[in-house]
Image: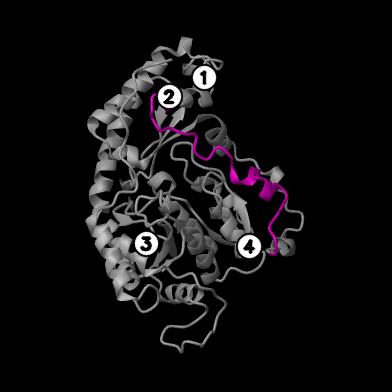
């Protein structure tokens, strides 16, 4: 089936002379690691950008989650509530901190952690909650924080998709105890690999700093190691790129928002295409992903796989996203957790094959469809092309067969 291919969408990541000059300056300085100034500059800038007092930059977003859990005092076998519809490391960071991930289903409107289902998963062993601001849409933080305060739990915001996103006018990462961010190459703010935590709690910030710097303490001697830790420091080269990239982030975020809202309006008029709901609490959506739900009943029963292939044929970069839930991954079903055996202390009969999250399973296996954020950096004409192609696929649904594609 042909509908007329559209042009290429903007490339990602983007860079220019500013990034090249910044990298050259670090190279010429000879201070590529400790001793340089770019990391500290970025930490101050990013903390302020997210509305926090402190930030610690690290090697990647997976490490920031793990180290945040350790900084919050997670002990062997302690449970941490996580959603299953997210990248693997939201859960494996818990395992690497010697804890036990407990999966709670997602909200069908937002695909974020369903706050109404959290309390039934809390046990005496629960230590923390990790809500994911999926696709850049902030989770229901008022409800989550109320539950956390009631049960004396830590909240670590997985904000890997949500640089600059706002919940009721406050930037994500500043709402819980610690916010975790990724700067991996696909992210809205990126430097290839990298991550950072943000927090308003001085003790937690110092804990994270120590863990990421070989257990040293602030203002201590170089060979004074008081805590368990490792070298999880960001390089000056990565920070130099971030210091330039963050200058463009607001303008890019606003463009993504405008195009996403336009797509919401237009795509919602096509039967079987249902954009995720943007809650009124969301005063700024970062749109790392544009997500909509596909209902095959309106497309002659054709599978999501075939629908997406039809879009890909027309050069629309749509995907099924997290098509495999975390608790269904082989490592979870077989408990291939290596030396991280804390689960044996509190839950020796742990069996993830018994976990069922119906909403997440439907999202992963049947209905969830994504556009990457760089699509939203296109023109209004690009958005119209997307709408036209999906409309055409709908109009030709009787011809769209599984065998054809």
Disc 4 target residue: 99
Span of residues in magenta: 312-339
- Residue 215: percent from the left, percent from the top? 52, 79
Give the CA distance from mark 1 to mark 2. Answer: 9 Å
Q: Which label lies toward us, 3 or 2?
A: 2
Disc 1 target residue: 405
Outermost residue toward the top in this view? 398
- First in sequence: mark 4 vs mark 1: 4
- Residue 39: percent from the left, percent from the top? 35, 70
Q: Which label lies toward us, 3 or 4?
A: 4
Give the CA distance from mark 3 to mark 2. Answer: 42 Å
Give the CA distance from mark 3 to mark 4. Answer: 24 Å
Outermost residue toward the front in this view? 28
- For label 4, the SS is loop
- Residue 371: percent from the left, percent from the top? 40, 36
**CB atoms of marks 4 and 1 within 8 Å:** no
State whether residue 105 appears in this view. yes
**CB atoms of marks 1 and 2 within 8 Å:** yes
């Amino acid at each position: 089936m042909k509908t007329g291919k559209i042009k290429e969408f903007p490339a990602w990541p983007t860079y220019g002379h500013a990034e090249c000059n910044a990298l050259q300056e670090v190279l010429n300085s000879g201070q590529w690691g400790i001793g340089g100034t770019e990391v500290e500059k970025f930490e101050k800038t990013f903390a302020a950008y997210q509305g926090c007092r402190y930030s610690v930059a690290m090697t990647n977003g997976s490490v920031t989650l793990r180290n945040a859990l350790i900084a919050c005092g997670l002990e062997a076998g302690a449970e941490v509530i996580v959603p299953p519809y997210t990248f693997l490391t939201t859960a494996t960071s818990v395992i690497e901190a010697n804890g036990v991930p407990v999966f709670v289903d997602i909200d069908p409107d937002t695909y974020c952690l369903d706050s109404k289902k959290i309390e039934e998963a809390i046990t005496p062993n629960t230590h923390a909650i990790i809500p994911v601001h999926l696709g850049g849409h902030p989770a229901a933080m008022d409800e989550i924080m109320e539950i956390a305060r009631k049960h004396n739990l830590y909240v670590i915001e997985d904000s890997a998709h949500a640089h600059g996103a706002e919940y009721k006018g406050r930037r994500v990462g500043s709402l819980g105890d610690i916010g975790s961010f990724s700067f991996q190459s696909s992210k809205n703010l990126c430097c290839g690999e990298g991550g950072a935590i943000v927090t308003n709690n001085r003790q937690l910030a110092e804990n994270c700093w120590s863990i990421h710097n070989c257990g040293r303490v602030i203002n201590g001697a170089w060979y004074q190691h008081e805590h368990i830790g490792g070298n999880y420091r960001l390089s000056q080269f990565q920070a130099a790129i971030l210091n330039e990239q963050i200058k463009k982030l607001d303008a890019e975020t606003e463009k993504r928002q405008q195009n996403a809202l336009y797509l919401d309006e237009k795509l919602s008029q096509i039967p079987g295409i249902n954009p995720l709901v943007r809650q009124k609490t969301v005063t700024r959506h970062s749109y790392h992903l544009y997500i909509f739900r596909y209902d095959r009943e309106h497309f002659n029963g054709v599978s999501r796989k075939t629908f997406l292939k039809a879009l890909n044929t027309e050069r629309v970069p749509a995907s099924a996203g997290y098509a495999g839930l975390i608790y269904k991954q082989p490592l979870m079903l077989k408990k291939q957790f290596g030396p991280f055996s804390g689960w044996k202390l509190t839950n020796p009969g742990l069996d993830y094959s018994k976990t069922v999250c119906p909403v997440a399973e439907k999202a992963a296996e049947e209905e969830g469809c994504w556009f990457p954020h760089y699509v939203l950096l296109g023109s209004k004409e690009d958005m119209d092309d997307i709408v036209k192609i999906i409309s055409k696929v709908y109009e030709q649904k009787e011809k769209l067969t599984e065998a054809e594609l």
